[in-house]
Image (spheres, grey):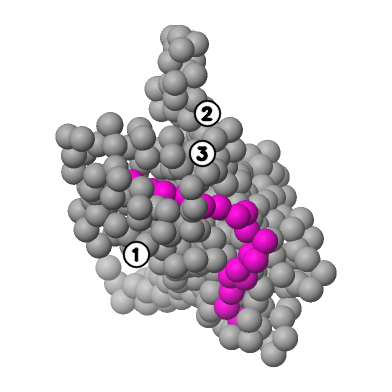
């Protein structure tokens, strides 16, 4: 090719290359600029009543991946009853609303994209999104396996002083389609279990959710028989007599062999009374734990009926 023809062609190709490079650079710049632009969350006052349902359709605003990762690592770090229904914890979350707190801190209401969970999250504020504490305030969980249906619904009401009362309701229903009336009467808790707990929280000076102990908790007096392996051979005879003695004095009685940290206590009409953690008092493989509201629990080893009856009378101050 002659030199006078090659020069114009080279100039044309260089011009095209420069134009394409500029366009690509502009597109890339706009893309980066868009991604780095912060999301403006709605700011207001979180509702007095918080609940969730699968039909929720309000908009959720996106959260940074780093925020979600830290939140998921912290999501069980709160005092009070944990969920009873076993479920996979969601990984996709969005912001519902942000409330300004004193000293520049912020309170985020976030919700899972599957609409099953709502959490309140306190942050250091000023746009840093540094998480200080977390608290679940609403759940709507359902789990069905074979003939058992479990449901769990938590709702929260905000008091005038700013505290949060989280009402936690759990129900377990076992089908009675193939169950005789006698089987149901023998063990009704096998077919219907319900539990309702109210935990009250406030935001303390450190911007953490602090559980407020409920002084109005139901009065109870109970004996727990626990064992980690097998029952003793003479258990049936001794315990049937001991249970009858307890019932005469309105002392509740419960056998426990697992889940020692979540023992649900029911009265003799199968009404839920309280949920207790007895793990701090299990210092021998099997025994009896005497418990009464306002009293220090006492653990005694399994023995003869007469010996256990004496221990029970001493603890509960029974005079026959």
Q: Position of residue 94 (x, y in %)?
A: 59, 59
For the magenta stretch, what is the residue range?
207-225
Report if the CB atoms under discs 2 and 1 are less than 8 Å apart.
Answer: no
Q: In terms of secondary structure, where does tag 1 sit?
A: helix
Q: Which residue is mark 3?
A: 248
Residue 190 in the image: above or below residue 109: above
Label 2 close to label 3 by CB (< 8 Å): no
Q: Residue furthest front?
A: 320
Front in this rendered view, residue 317 or 3: 317
Q: In this rendering, would 124 be left or right of 180? A: right
Give the residue pinned by disc 1.
280
**Badge nearest the viewer, 2 or 1:** 1
- Would residue 168 be visible to someone looking at this image? yes
Q: Position of residue 170 (x, y in %)?
A: 56, 41
Which residue is tagged 2? Answer: 192
Question: Who comes first in sequence, dot 2 or dot 1?
Answer: 2
Label whose residue precedes the other's in the sequence (2 or 3)? 2
CA neighbours of label 2 inside 10 A, class few (<14), some (14 to 19), many (20+) = some
Identity of the residue drawn at 69% across and 56% down: 156
Residue 213 forms part of the magenta stretch: yes
In whole angstroms, how far apart are the C-alphas of marks 2 and 1? 29 Å
Instruction: For the N terminus, give its image quadrant.
Output: bottom left
Question: At 65% across and 52% down in the image, what residue appears?
Answer: 167
């Amino acid at each position: 090719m002659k030199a006078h023809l090659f020069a114009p062609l080279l100039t044309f190709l260089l011009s095209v290359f420069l134009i394409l490079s500029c366009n690509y650079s502009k597109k890339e710049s706009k893309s980066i600029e868009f991604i780095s632009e912060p999301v403006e969350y709605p700011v207001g006052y979180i509702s007095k009543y918080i609940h969730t349902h699968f039909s929720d359709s309000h908009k959720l605003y996106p959260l940074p991946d780093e925020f979600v990762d830290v939140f998921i690592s912290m999501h069980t770090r709160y005092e009070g009853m944990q969920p009873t229904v076993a479920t996979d914890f969601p990984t996709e979350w969005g912001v519902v609303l942000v409330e300004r707190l004193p000293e520049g801190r912020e309170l985020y209401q976030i919700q899972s994209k599957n609409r099953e969970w709502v959490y309140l999250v306190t942050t250091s504020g000023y746009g840093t999104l540094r998480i200080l504490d977390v608290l679940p305030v609403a759940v709507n969980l359902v789990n069905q396996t074979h003939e058992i249906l479990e449901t769990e619904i938590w709702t929260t009401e905000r008091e005038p002083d700013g505290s949060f009362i989280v009402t936690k309701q759990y129900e377990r229903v076992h089908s009675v389609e193939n169950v005789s009336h006698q089987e149901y009467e023998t063990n009704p808790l096998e077919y219907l279990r319900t539990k309702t707990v109210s935990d009250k929280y406030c935001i303390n000076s450190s911007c953490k959710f602090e559980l407020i102990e409920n002084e109005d908790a139901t009065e109870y007096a109970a004996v727990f028989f626990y064992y980690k392996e097998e029952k003793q051979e003479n258990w049936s005879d001794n315990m049937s007599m001991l249970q009858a003695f307890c019932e005469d004095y309105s002392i509740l009685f419960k056998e426990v062999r697992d889940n020692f940290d979540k023992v649900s206590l029911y009265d003799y009409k199968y009404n839920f009374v309280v949920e207790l953690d007895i793990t701090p008092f299990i210092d021998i493989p099997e025994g009896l734990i005497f418990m009464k509201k306002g009293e220090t629990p006492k653990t005694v080893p399994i023995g003869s009926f007469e010996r256990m009856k004496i221990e029970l009378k001493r603890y509960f101050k029974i005079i026959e």
